[in-house]
């Protein structure tokens, strides 16, 4: 005894005589044939870079992406490097394969140390190629450690020092009681140690040198300032 067939739920049947259904079937078949023919026509050989990597700017705290377009068959093995050191795929550096022709590296949570030269090496059984570009990091100007207040005797040398950071390297100004300090034989302003320190030197200190001193830093992303008191005894 045969069981009665249960009718499919509404909307789960296709009418093959419907012109729209026939047109969709033709498009699917054509797409499949095109994909198969493109794959069959790809010639085996060493990888080639069709679109080079380009330098990118990474703002501190954000992410940046390096990408290039490649041609390779069989599919290649991809490795990324920073300044010659291999980068592992993980939370900080993310290998991205957006489609068969594009490869990318995403650098997350940007910091100043991400500045450098990045290289992608692309390899398959027939050979290898590589390309490089730089990540340029932008960091707001900042005074990480300001000058300390000083008490000095007349005739001695007073040194005020601040630790600064920023990319592009910030412009620096020193002020006394709100006025810019112009360098001369007694007042010397120096930038040292890979532009991470700024030093103001006051030679042969006088009573008139006592006051409120300010160091001010600025770049296109921000400004910062710090104060210190100098007393001449």
Image (cartoon, grey):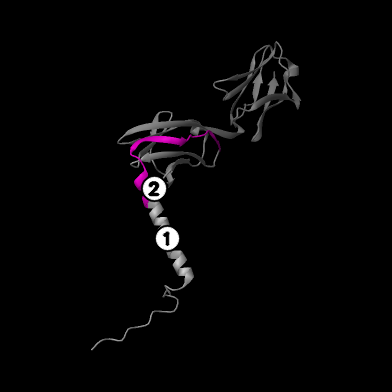
Is 29 drawn above or below residue 88 in the view shown? below
Nearer-the-camera pick, 175 or 11:
11
State the image coordinates of residue 20 (x, y, percent, origin top left): 48, 69
- Residue at 35% x, 32% y is 128
Is 184 drawn above or below residue 218 in the view shown? above
User: Which quadrant is the N terminus positioned in?
Assistant: bottom left
State the image coordinates of residue 24 (x, y, percent, origin top left): 45, 64
Query: Residue 208 sits in which quadrant?
Result: top right
The first of marks 1 and 2 along the sequence is: 1
- Residue at 41% x, 45% y is 100
Q: Badge 2 is on which residue? A: 38
Nearer-the-camera pick, 2 or 39:
39
Which numbered disc covers residue 201?
none
Query: Residue 80 sits in which quadrant?
Result: top left
Which class describes the residues within 10 Å of circle 1: few (<14), some (14-19), or many (20+)?
A: few
User: Which quadrant is the C terminus positioned in?
Assistant: top right
State the image coordinates of residue 183 (x, y, percent, origin top left): 71, 16
**Is residue 60 left or right of 47 when viewed as pictured?**
right
Q: Which SS class for mark 2?
A: helix
**Is residue 82 left or right of 124 when viewed as pictured?**
right
Query: Residue 15 sits in which quadrant?
Result: bottom left
User: Which residues are the magenta region?
Assistant: 36-58
Q: Which SS class for mark 1?
A: helix
State the image coordinates of residue 74 (x, y, percent, origin top left): 33, 41
Decide whether residue 38 is among the magenta residues.
yes
Which class describes the residues within 10 Å of circle 2: few (<14), some (14-19), or many (20+)?
A: few
Q: Badge 1 is on which residue? A: 28
Number of numbered discs:
2
**Is residue 222 left or right of 120 when viewed as pictured?**
right
Q: Disc 1 versus disc 2: distance between alpha carbons?
A: 15 Å
Q: Residue furthest left?
A: 1
């Amino acid at each position: 005894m045969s069981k009665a067939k249960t009718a499919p739920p509404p909307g789960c049947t296709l009418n093959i005589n419907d012109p729209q259904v026939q047109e969709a079937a033709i498009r699917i078949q054509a797409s499949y044939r095109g994909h198969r023919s493109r794959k069959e026509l790809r010639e085996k050989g060493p990888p080639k870079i069709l679109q080079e990597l380009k330098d990118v700017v990474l703002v501190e705290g954000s992410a940046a992406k390096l990408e290039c377009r490649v041609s390779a068959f069989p599919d290649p093995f991809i490795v990324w490097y920073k300044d010659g050191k291999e980068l592992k795929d993980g939370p900080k550096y993310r290998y991205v394969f957006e489609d068969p022709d594009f490869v990318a590296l995403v650098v997350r949570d940007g910091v100043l140390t991400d500045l450098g030269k990045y290289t992608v090496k692309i390899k398959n059984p027939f050979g290898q190629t590589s390309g490089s570009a730089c990540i340029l990091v932008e960091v707001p100007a900042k005074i990480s450690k300001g000058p300390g207040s000083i008490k000095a005797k007349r005739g001695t040398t007073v040194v005020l020092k601040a630790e600064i950071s920023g990319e592009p390297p910030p412009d620096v100004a020193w002020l006394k009681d709100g006025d810019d300090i112009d360098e001369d034989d007694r007042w010397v302003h120096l930038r040292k140690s890979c532009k991470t320190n700024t030093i103001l030197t006051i030679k042969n200190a006088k009573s008139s040198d006592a006051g409120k001193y300010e160091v001010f830093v600025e770049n296109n992303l921000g400004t910062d300032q710090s104060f210190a008191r100098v007393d001449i005894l």
